[in-house]
Image (spheres, helix red, strand yellow):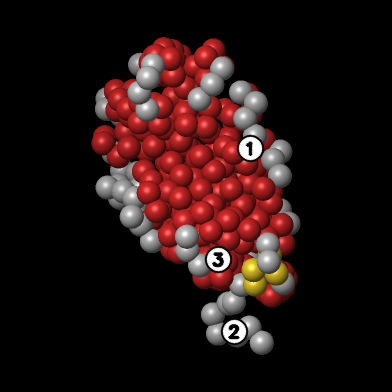
Amino acid sequence: MTEEGIASRVKNSTTAVLKGTGGIVSGVADVARDVTVTALKDAADIANAVTGTAASVISGAFGAVQDVGSGAINTIKGVVVGLIQGVGEVGVVTVGVISDTVRAAFKGTKDIGVDAAETASAVAEGVISATRNTGVGLTEAAVELGRSALQGAKDVGGDVIAIASSTVSGAAAGASEIGGNVIDAIRGTAKGIVKGAGELGTDIADATTGALSGAISGAKKLGLSAEDAASAAAQGALEAAEGIGESAVHTVRDVAASSVDGVKAVLKGEQDT
């Protein structure tokens, strides 16, 4: 199946889902999964074929959103879930698959006028909820999600703090949806965000602030401790900063010591005095 054929098939099927009365997330996920499986099952090199397939599946789904004029956020989550599940049916889901999916989603939503922060939340929920029954662990997926979200932010020129916040909050929601460890998801996503910031030369303070803010808002939505969530995000950010350099470590510690959204994070081995 050509990339044009993939996009066309997904667009037609997603249009039917959006115009129907069933659930959009599950319906779009089914479409994306089925088309991904069909496109990849005869590929000589699945790993190399995923990038083009992901871009085509997402292009088709977002083309349907443009035509119908509604359902963007649910479509984003559904197509991410379906893509990852589809790859898992015919091959192995790797961090590279997550990266390809996240970045393709960011690029695609820019074309349909969806806010990058809203995109980040939906993508994060989709990625984390799709890790169930794949070869990628929740924490590993969360780290790559955070890192790729920062790359996606750069790709579309999005606000780093807003995207980091929405990504962590969405990851928490995704983990809760599958009965996963929400704190691990928060910590891993924050680690990936700061790691990505270091790789891209993005402001570490902004990335850390956004990660902590998302942890706090995500925890509050789920009825969990905002302090525990903020501390987990700070710990993940610190772990990434230690691999970047001394200046990054100081920056993360400074943000953690300050009050983000009225909540002060406590790093391991430190006490709130």
* Residue type for callout 3: Ala
Q: Residues within 10 Å of mark 1 (few under 14, many from 20)?
A: many
Image position, residue 204 (x, y; %)? 70, 60
Residue at image coords 31%, 43% = 92
Residue at image coords 63%, 46% = 163
Quadrant containing the N terminus in the rendered view:
top left
Image position, residue 72 (x, y; %)? 53, 27
Q: Which of pointers 1 and 2 lies earlier in the amino acid sequence? A: 1
Question: Which residue is disc 1 drawn over?
Answer: 116
- Report the disc number at residue 226: 3
Nearest the eye: 263 or 148: 263
Q: Tell me: residue 136, above or below residue 3.
A: below
Q: Which of pointers 3 and 2 lies earlier in the amino acid sequence? A: 3
Question: Is residue 116 at all visible to an observer of this figure?
Answer: yes
Q: Secondary structure at mark 3?
A: helix
Real-space Cα distance between discs 3 and 2? Answer: 17 Å
Quadrant containing the C terminus in the rendered view:
bottom right
Residue at image coords 54%, 52% = 169
Q: Tell me: residue 173, above or below residue 154.
A: below
Q: Secondary structure at mark 1?
A: helix
* Residue type for callout 1: Ala
Q: Tell me: residue 143, above or below residue 102.
A: below
On the image, which quarter does residue 209 sit in? Answer: bottom right
* Residue type for callout 2: Glu
Question: Which residue is disc 2 drawn over?
Answer: 270
On the image, which quarter does residue 120 sit in? Answer: top right
Q: Tell me: residue 188, above or below residue 12.
A: below
